[in-house]
């Protein structure tokens, strides 16, 4: 079992460029999360999906960030256009339902915006 | 406000010494708390959760509602315990949001 898969692992772009991150959750996990982790901080939730439905996107900056989870499996997080302050690690996690269920994290994508 | 505070950025101890990683929380409801760990070059993973009242790798954590704390303890630190530790609070409203502290780096010296 590969666990949660994310790609790319690293991405360097110039500001104002678009960028996309991909996540493949653990098979059978219907709940998927995207987190943002700034340097020296803990992860902060951006969006949570239950199957294909975004049930909590209150922390997602909707002017430049978007996410989708078509067919309730893989998910993509996009930033357009990227800003210098978006440099961070973007983590994907999945679980068998929300609540107490353990969240399993991917390795993350480290984004650097120049 | 819902908040998790880990006051120490770095905790350095010698092998065999006791360890206590501090975690304080602010939450109006009944808290469910977790400790996550990230070893070097590995992904973030669950270490233990309050509801299970378990000991994992010799670590324990007791919820103190009076002091709003969930400190992580181990009586004898090992070098392999060196890692980044995050305390997290699960909000038990419909959002089921996991709120993380800023983390404490534990360094166990030989």
Image: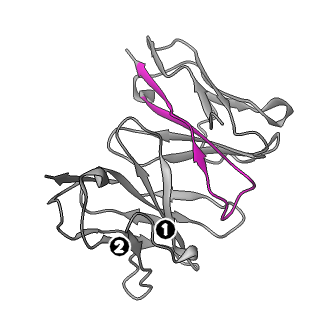
Q: For residue B58, which numbered disc appears in the image?
A: none
User: Where are the magenta residues, as a range?
Assistant: A88-112
Q: Which residue is mark 2?
A: B71
**In the displayed structure, does residue B10 sit left or right of residue B62?**
left
Please count the marks in the image.
2
Residue A101's x, y, as percent? 67, 60
**Residue name at image x 43 percent, y 38 percent:** B42
Magenta stretch encompasses residue A87: no
Within-10-Å neighbours for mark 1: few <14, some 14–19, many 20+: few
Q: Which residue is mark 1?
A: B1
Return the residue nearer the eye: B41 or B57. B57
Quadrant placement of the N terminus of chain A: top right
Residue A55's x, y, as percent? 76, 49
| Display colour scheme | one colour
Identify the secondary structure beneath mark 2.
loop
Identify the secondary structure beneath mark 1.
loop
**In the displayed structure, does residue B20 sit left or right of residue A84?**
left
Q: Quadrant of residue A75?
A: top right
**Residue name at image x 45 percent, y 85 percent:** B65
Q: In this picture, is A69 found above or below B46?
A: above
Q: Residue furthest bottom?
A: B66
**Residue name at image x 40 percent, y 88 percent:** B66
Q: Nearer the viewer, mark 2 or mark 1?
A: 2
Quadrant placement of the C terminus of chain A: top left
Q: Residue furthest right?
A: A71
Pick whichever of labels 2 and 1 is earlier in the sequence: 1
Residue B84's x, y, as percent? 34, 50
**Residue name at image x 86 percent, y 32 percent:** A71
Q: Chain of mark 2?
A: B
């Amino acid at each position: 079992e590969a666990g949660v898969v994310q790609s790319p692992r690293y991405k360097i772009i110039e500001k104002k460029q678009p960028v996309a991150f991909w996540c493949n959750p653990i098979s059978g996990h219907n709940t998927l999360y995207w987190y943002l982790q700034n340097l020296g901080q803990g992860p902060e939730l951006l969006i949570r999906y239950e199957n294909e439905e975004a049930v909590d996107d209150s922390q997602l900056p909707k002017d430049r960030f978007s996410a989708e989870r078509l067919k309730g499996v893989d998910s993509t997080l996009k930033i357009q256009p990227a800003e210098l302050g978006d440099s961070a690690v973007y983590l994907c996690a999945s679980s068998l339902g929300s609540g107490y269920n353990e969240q399993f994290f991917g390795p993350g994508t480290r984004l650097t915006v120049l | 406000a819902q908040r998790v505070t880990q006051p120490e950025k770095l905790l350095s101890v010698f092998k065999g010494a006791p360890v206590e990683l501090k975690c304080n929380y602010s939450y109006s409801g009944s808290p469910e708390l977790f400790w996550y760990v990230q070893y070097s070059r590995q992904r973030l993973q669950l270490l233990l959760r309050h509801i299970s009242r378990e000991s994992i790798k010799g670590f324990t954590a007791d919820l103190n509602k009076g002091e709003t704390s969930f400190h992580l303890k181990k009586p004898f630190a090992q070098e392999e315990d060196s890692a980044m530790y995050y305390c997290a609070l699960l909000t038990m409203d419909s959002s089921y949001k996991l709120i993380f502290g800023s983390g404490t780096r534990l360094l166990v010296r030989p």
